[in-house]
Image (spheres, grey):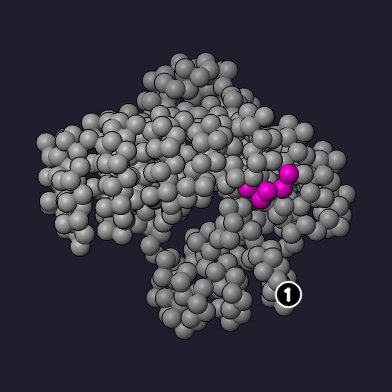
């Protein structure tokens, strides 16, 4: 938890202005985990029937309830379950794509207050919780008015900045100036405006940068444009070796802070800053609000063992989100840094799947310290077998995951890994799974075999080759899908240039 003195030292980075946590621990006073769960269930039961708020949320609230129960347990002083399992960014960042007006924030608060009253009997406790939550909820409001169309409450909001960001990145000054002049609120969202500035800084578009700063964009607000850590424009300019630009940003008020110095590996600056203000060693970046990202995290992401060692010698703590540290050091292939972190108590158990499995030295170290590629459930399948997010066939990666204990019986969205690689058209990965004994006729939750999944592959997939491999391995072409169609029936109806070859392959099986 960040102290007032720490907050003052790093306040230039923005973030939520309200205190993040209640004054004292509430968890035991409300009655523990079961009562927190009742409060959140009551909140989401009310949201479920609120036609104003419901469009802001995903289709099913089941997973959302789990996340909020973990968040509020941690917020009230219980176990940091939210940080362990769900926190990948701060609350401001996580809500930036949702259209939240002051009225919406107040409606959410009214539902929370109603749920608290229905669950708790202590009026003073209800008041304490409500008063602690009010500035936080209102601090997430990012629009002055409600959205005119309920369909625009979720995800649609960020479309407003998509084209301006492209213009900033290209240095198209005149077009962006016209857009800003025609939309006075375009730069009112500090985070979105900061991303425009970052896009211009990345390519050193000086006139664009000057325009944005002149129009009020804060030069010290960090964003995650380059890495999944938040960097200020000044830090990004130094990192990109835009030396003249970094000096220009300093002349416009850029602050060179402990986070930037740690990320960039500036040991002299880190030593001086921490010597002058020891509180900075464990200061959290306010731009990340509830995600406690300290200078130690910046040093690890920057891959600087000397900074990490200095911070530890000065009292740095790994904190509850230490798995992120281990994962980053492992992904960077830095064996020394992995050892340093683990020796200081960083947690490897929730590292999950990643490219670290291809480094046998690091893989052995992490597995020895409890790393599990099956955490969280289904993720290893998502990142190696589905073809999502332009994922390419990577049989070597899949083979290393299996060596590290990936469970081939894992089901993701009702299907096994062998179903997913067949649908993705990943020839090499399919062979790896079959060589490892994957059942070529295993049914999905809907009763479909990998062969039926293969016939759902995209137009660029080598569907005929996938079918040939499956059939050679013993795939049964007579199994029917939920609509009663066999593989042959589906093949005949395909609208592909190779449809005839596929149908002939299946017919000849």
Question: Is 284 included in the stretch rendered in magenta?
Answer: no
Looking at the image, residue 249 sits to the left or right of residue 57; the answer is right
Which residue lies at the image location 53% right of the left edge and 31% below the top edge? Answer: 405
Span of residues in magenta: 331-335
| Most common secondary structure along the magenta stretch | loop
Q: Residues within 10 Å of mark 1 (few under 14, many from 20)?
A: few
- Residue 245 position, x and y percent, is 69, 75
Tell me which residue sits at (54%, 69%) in the image: 199
Question: x, y (%) of residue 20?
Answer: 59, 39
- The C terminus lies in quadrant: top left
| Quadrant housing residue 363 | top right
**Residue 194 at x, y = what percent?**
56, 64
Does residue 471 appear to the left or right of 244 in the view shown? Answer: left
Q: Nearer the viewer, residue 58 or 211?
A: 58
What residue is disc 1 on?
A: 243
Left or right of 332, for residue 381: left
Q: Is residue 128 visible?
A: no
């Amino acid at each position: 938890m960040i102290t007032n003195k720490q907050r003052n030292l790093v306040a230039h980075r923005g973030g939520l202005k309200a205190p993040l946590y209640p004054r004292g621990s509430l968890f035991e006073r409300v009655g523990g985990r079961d009562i927190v769960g009742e409060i959140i269930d009551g909140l989401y039961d009310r949201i479920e029937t609120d036609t104003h708020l419901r469009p802001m949320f995903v289709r099913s609230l089941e997973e959302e309830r789990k996340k909020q129960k973990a968040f509020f347990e941690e917020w009230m002083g219980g176990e940091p379950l939210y940080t362990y399992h769900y926190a990948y960014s701060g609350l401001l960042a996580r809500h930036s794509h949702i259209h939240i007006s002051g009225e919406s924030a107040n409606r959410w608060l009214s539902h929370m207050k109603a749920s608290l009253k229905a669950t708790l009997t202590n009026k003073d406790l209800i008041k304490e919780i409500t008063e602690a939550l009010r500035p936080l909820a209102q601090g997430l409001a990012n629009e002055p008015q409600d959205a005119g169309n309920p369909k625009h409450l979720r995800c649609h909001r960020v479309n407003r900045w998509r084209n301006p960001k492209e213009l900033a990145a290209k240095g198209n000054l005149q077009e962006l100036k016209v857009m800003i002049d025609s939309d006075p609120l375009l730069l009112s969202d500090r985070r979105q405006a900061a991303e425009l500035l970052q896009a211009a800084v990345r390519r050193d578009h000086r006139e664009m940068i000057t325009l944005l700063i002149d129009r009020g964009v804060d030069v010290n607000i960090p964003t995650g444009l380059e890495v999944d850590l938040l960097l200020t424009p000044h830090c990004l300019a130094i990192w990109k070796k835009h030396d003249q630009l970094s000096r220009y940003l300093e002349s416009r008020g850029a602050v060179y802070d402990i986070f930037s110095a740690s990320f960039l590996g500036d040991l002299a600056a880190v030593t001086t800053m921490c010597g002058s203000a020891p509180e900075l060693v464990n200061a959290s970046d306010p731009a990340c609000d509830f995600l406690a990202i300290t200078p130690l995290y910046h040093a690890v992401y920057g891959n600087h063992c000397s900074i990490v060692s200095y911070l530890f010698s000065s009292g740095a703590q790994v904190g509850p989100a230490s798995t992120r540290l281990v994962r980053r050091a492992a992904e960077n292939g830095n064996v020394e840094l992995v050892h340093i972190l683990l020796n200081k108590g960083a947690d490897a158990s929730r590292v999950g799947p990643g490219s670290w499995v291809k480094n046998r030295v690091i893989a052995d170290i992490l597995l020895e310290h409890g790393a599990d590629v099956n955490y969280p459930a289904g993720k290893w399948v998502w990142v190696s077998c589905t073809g999502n997010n332009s994922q390419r066939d990577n049989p070597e990666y899949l083979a290393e995951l299996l060596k590290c204990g990936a469970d081939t019986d894992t089901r993701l969205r009702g299907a096994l890994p062998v179903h997913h690689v067949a649908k993705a058209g990943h020839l090499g990965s399919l062979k790896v799974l079959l060589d490892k004994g994957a059942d070529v006729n295993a049914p999905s939750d809907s009763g479909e075999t990998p062969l039926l999944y293969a016939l759902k592959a995209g137009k660029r997939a080598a569907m005929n080759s996938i079918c040939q491999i499956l059939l050679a391995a013993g795939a049964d072409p007579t199994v029917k899908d939920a609509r009663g169609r066999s593989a042959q029936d589906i093949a005949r109806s395909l609208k592909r240039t190779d449809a005839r070859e596929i149908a002939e392959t299946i017919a000849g099986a």
